[in-house]
Amino acid sequence: MSEPEAPERLNFVEKIVTEDLSSGRTQQVHTRFPPEPNGYLHIGHAKAICINFGLATKFGGVCNLRFDDTNPAKEDVEYVEAIQADIRWLGFDWGERLYFASGWFEELYQFAEHLVQTGHAYVCDLSAEEVREYRAFPEPGRNSPGRERTPEESLDLLRRMKAGEFPDGSRTLRAKIDMASPNINLRDPVLYRIARATHHRTGDDWCIYPMYDFAHGQSDALEGITHSLCSLEFENHRPLYNWFLDHLPIEKRPQQTEFARLALTYTMVSKRKLLQLIEEKVVEGWSDPRMPTLRALRRRGYTPEAIRSFIDTIGVAKFNSTVDLVVLENALRGDLNRSAQRRMGVLRPLKVTITNWPEGQTEQLEAVNNPEDESAGSRTMPFGSELWIEQDDFREEPPPKFFRLKPGGKVRLRYAYVITCDEVVKDDAGNVTELRCTYHPETRGGQKPAEGGKVKGIVHWVNAQHCVDAEVRLYDHLFSKENPEDVEEGGHWRDNLNPDSLEVLGGAKLELALADAAPGEKFQFERLGYFCRDTESAGLVFNRTVTLRDSWAKIEQQG
RNA sequence: UACCCCGUGGUGUAAUUGGCAACACAUCUGGUUUUGGUCCAGACGUUUCAGGUUCAAGUCCUGGCGGGGUAACCA
């Protein structure tokens, strides 16, 4: 009776979870998204967010938001706030489960004492450089003199470190593991360093701070995380992650699994480099619509739905792949096509005069708001004798297959009449300044012209007497190379910047309905693309989110 | 250099765990259409290499080649 259902295609993380659930190893899935509050979230983080929250949802579990704030020198509350706003915008909710690694500082410190007391950690007096030398990688390393200290001596020193008796950088607490391990993370890793920095949450309560490795797995354990997902570069940390779990009195044992982070063509997410772009005024700031940050994508007009469906499409694996940016754009078009109302806007206006239109008359013509959504209804557009059409929609010398307007030719004005171009008016420089046309009254409502012949071209327009001026910002890739980091010898990634990533059009003519668009409101400008009203500008400014697919551009390019 | 991870169409992921290599995007062709949009139909094309085990290998074994990660008192 019912169709056999296609087997669900699980990614490798989902398979692990499925197994853990069916074996009883896991009762309820519990994940976490663990950003360091030292910058804004970008599209790469969106993958981690969707995977962690999505996995929990899919298997009936929960997901924590945990700030990995163990390095106060780099962190700030500003990012704590911004990150939460971005995650909410993406559509995820951590409920009451907001955590901070700094919230576990006391527990972590007790873990440290435990390690010292059980002979698994010691206070080391070596400088940072000396630690590196003693590790002697890849040769077997040498033991630090501190390694020989008794637990009592190390404990005393640790407590005095905590009490602030020693200067910054003078001592560290290290795990006693194996200085000859082929995995450098196991060569007596540093657990605590002395650093007098004011923490954005704990203030000056602490002058010693735990390292990532000593904080992360234990925070996972304390929060009851079952599946700790992170990116590939932490693979080598997993043995250490597990070593701590083995040597500490923890009840629930989390499991670390690594997956490949997202890489996108034409996109660079390096914080340091993006900051350079801002400082050099290549872009406006972290929310410049060309940036890969979530706030920039939001301002650009991206929807959370599109980003989520994109992440869903690209899958999860351990292979370091690069996803084509068009996949993201396509997800966006798919969402916006369903949800965005249609409007007409002329970006580069060319005047059209309808010479046989009754003087001073205006006619209201019905235009559908969204052909994909009947409930969106319709609106009317005023037609008259003075119109604007797109400069691109007229060619004095049309290339092959061009079926828009040409001298003596016909074109349909969308939702209005077919017109014939009778006369081309030019200025002294030879630029086309106006087209004088006649309209065909019988073609209203999609009828063919009385004189026969099919009119293939349809162009958008606005009434010059009833329109509003606006600024429209056309965005393109920030970089012209698929891989922005791909530079010739002696070159710089800056050379890969796309000089045309932003084009500002000051004199766009938009239909009146667009005059009171809300900031952030999204529309499809028919035949052009998706646009949204800018949220950070005073006047009437629209950002182009993404173009429509343009098969004509391809035809024309191929000549 | 040492250790770890990974190689499936142009791109990204699948393959009931050893049994006809599939899905999406891209590309090309055609159809529908008052958006050169959407939608629909079709075409294209693949297991990194060499051995081995097996009736049967993308899947298991050995070796090569290629790519990535790590080598912080950052995360």
Image: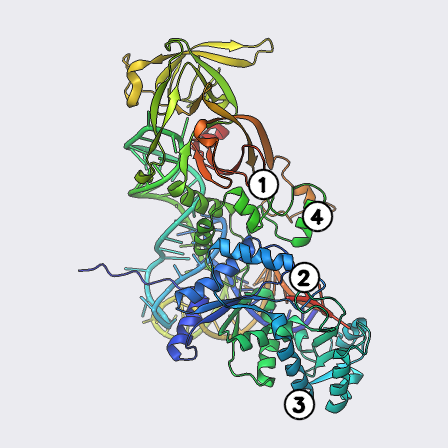
Reading the image, the residue beneath label 1 is: A536
The span from disc 2 to disc 4 (Cα, nearest Å) is: 19 Å
* Left or right of A432, for residue A147: right
The span from disc 1 to disc 2 (Cα, nearest Å) is: 26 Å
Q: Position of residue A217 (x, y in %)?
A: 58, 75
Above or below A420: residue A307? below
* Left or right of A507, for residue A412: left
Reading the image, the residue beneath label 2 is: A75
User: Image point 50% across, 56% down: which residue?
Assistant: A88
* Left or right of A185, for residue B49: left
Q: Amino acid at mark 4?
A: Gln
The span from disc 2 to disc 3 (Cα, nearest Å) is: 33 Å
User: Image point 47% across, 40% down: which residue?
Assistant: A521
Q: Position of residue A424 (x, y in %)?
A: 48, 10
Above or below A135: residue A440? above
Kindly tell me whether residue A262 is visible in this rendering. no
Q: Amino acid at mark 1?
A: Glu
The span from disc 4 to disc 1 (Cα, nearest Å) is: 22 Å
- Along the polypeptide, which appears first: circle 3 or circle 1? 3
Reading the image, the residue beneath label 3 is: A118
Q: Furthest-left residue in view?
A: A1
Circle 3 packing at 10 Å, graded few (<14), some (14-19), many (20+), is: few
Residue A276 tag number: 4
Q: Position of residue A530 (x, y in %)?
A: 46, 37
Q: Nearer the viewer, residue A85 or B4?
A: A85
